[in-house]
Image (spheres, rainbow, N blue to C red):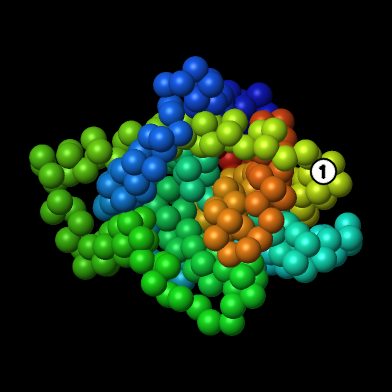
Amino acid sequence: MISPTTVIISVLPIYFLIIGGAFLRKIGVLRKDHDEGIMHVIFSVMLPCFILDRTLGADILRDFKVLFTGAGLGFLLIIVGITIGYVTGKFIGLAPGNGRRTFALTAGCQNFGFTAIPVVEILWGASAVAVLFVHNIGVEVAIWSVGVMLMSGERGIRWRRLVNGPIVAVVIGLVLVSLRVDDNITGPVRSAISMIGIGAFPLAILMTGASIIDLVGTEKPSWKIISASLVVRIIIAPITILLCAKYIPMAVELRQVLLVQAAMPAAMTPILLAKLYGGRPAIAVQIVVGTTVASIFTLPYIITYGIRFLQLSEFAK
């Protein structure tokens, strides 16, 4: 029987890396003036290589039903999450232009990248990771279309925002898999791709820890906002996602992905969007920090009981 202790032991290295990143920032090893260069290499080179390495040879991605269901649910569940956040923001007295839109986007969007991907790989293995990348296409489309329109008040969608390294890598990987030529990419080329990609997430998670410690203390916390975001991310969103995973027909790997998504804290992307499009970055910061700290304690229980609810009996071997 899988227990919360089993889960927390499995994912504890990720939280150690977050703490390590914060520590390295404090002692000056990870300096702020290095952030842009490091993140550019991670996002443009290392992460695309990791995605290709995990996508090539993933037989599950030859099933078009998995592709459409994964991307579709990625999009739909983010929209549902943002809607829940918007209603909750109104309930606690936030008004449009005074934080409600920032609250809705931040509380409604779970982490789908640097924290979620290693958790999925640790718990479920390579096939589930490949499905997560497909799921994330839908998430990216939702955030950079509906999310940006909400935050900025724009009516149009600038599709160029979706042209980035990870999305391009997923598309290339899916094309190669669908044409069944992915198994021909072997030898030194595949080894080089793997070697570059394997360091993406340890480094990215260290940078996440450094970023979080930068945010702590920048604004006086509002316990009303933090508490409401915890209700959205720790209670309502997990229930909603798990019910979808339970009752919508889908591949086992996608159920595994959605279970991890249900347990994730708020994503950091809305902080950037709040800065770029006239939102309230201070609100986004509080939600990210609060839900990330809370997830240390809530993630193992959501994963454990989600496994039983969805009848997922074992971790990856």
Taking depth in this image into account, of 290 and 304 the one nearest to the observer is 290
Residue 207 seen anywhere in this rendered image of the structure: yes
The quadrant of the image that shows the N terminus is: top right
Rendered location of residue 72, percent (x, y): 53, 70
Rendered location of residue 277, percent (x, y): 58, 64
Residue at point 51%, 67% (across, down): 144
Residue neighbourhood size for the residue with mark 1, other residues' Cα within 10 Å, grouped as few (<14), some (14–19), many (≥20): few
**Residue 196 figure quarter:** top left
Residue at point 28%, 47% (across, down): 45
Residue identifier under label 1: 222
Rendered location of residue 11, percent (x, y): 55, 30
| Image side of residue 13 versus residue 196, left or right | right
Taking depth in this image into account, of 210 and 119 the one nearest to the observer is 210
* Element on which disc 1 rests: loop
Residue 61 seen anywhere in this rendered image of the structure: no
Taking depth in this image into account, of 135 and 87 the one nearest to the observer is 87
| Image side of residue 39 versus residue 310, left or right | left
Query: Residue extending furthest bottom?
Result: 155
Query: Residue extending furthest top?
Result: 27
Rendered location of residue 231, percent (x, y): 81, 49
Residue at point 60%, 51% (across, down): 271
In the displayed structure, 215 sits above or below 101; it is above
**Residue 244 figure quarter:** bottom right
Residue type, numbered disc 1 = Ser
**Residue 308 figure quarter:** top right
The quadrant of the image that shows the C terminus is: top left
